[in-house]
Image (cartoon, rainbow, N blue to C red):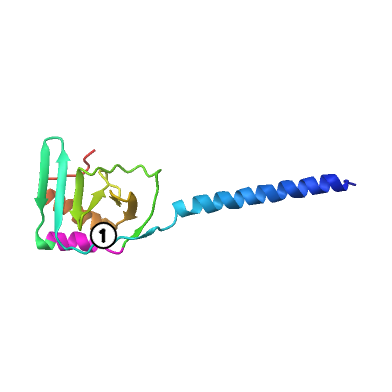
Amino acid sequence: MKNIKEILTNNKMKILFYTAAIILIIAIVPLFVACGNTSVNQTKATLVFKYEDKNINTELSDEESEQLCKIVNDKSTFSDDMLSCGFSDKIAFIIDGKTFCPACDECRTIKEWGSGKLFNISKSERNTIEKIFRNHGGYFPCA
């Protein structure tokens, strides 16, 4: 039979272990949950594509701007430093002073450059973005 000192020591170790585990979970979980929603108020967008021999910086049509606004508005954002998609503020569109960088590969993720927050888009939304970039001389993949 264990003496009381051993039992108390074992209980202290268990409490310490569970406390450390709870603190770790509290610290890690926010990295994987939504951090908020995207929001833009203006409807005019500017496209930026500075890569290789291209140096494009152009205001988009009302229709293209509206399409991009619909894509970015009210998306759930998240943080993920481990995401392998490449982003650049030189391959982006700007709405309401916010720079949105679609992944330079075929990843369906966009990074809001200023906040570093990410959000996912659908395949058709990705196709729309790529089409708008192509219309102005940009292309994907681009890094």
Report crowding for label 1: few under 14, some 14 to 19, many 20 or more residues within 10 A (C-alpha): many
- Counting from the top left corner in percent of width and height, residue 111 is at 29, 50
- Counting from the top left corner in percent of width and height, residue 89 is at 23, 44
Disc 1 marks which residue?
72
Towards the viewer: 133 or 61? 61
Does 17 sit above or below residue 52? Answer: below
In the image, 67: left or right of 26?
left
Of all residues shown, which one is farthest toward the right?
1
What's the magenta region? 64-74
Q: Secondary structure at mark 1?
A: helix
Magenta residues: mostly which secondary structure? helix
Q: Residue at x 24, y 62 (%)?
A: 40
Q: In the rendered structure, which amino acid carries the disc numbered 1?
A: Val
Q: Residue at x 56, y 49 (%)?
A: 24
Residue 123: within the magenta?
Answer: no
In the image, 99: left or right of 1?
left
Towards the viewer: 103 or 37? 37
- Counting from the top left corner in percent of width and height, residue 15 is at 70, 51
Q: Residue at x 60, y 53 (%)?
A: 22
Towards the viewer: 46 or 142? 46
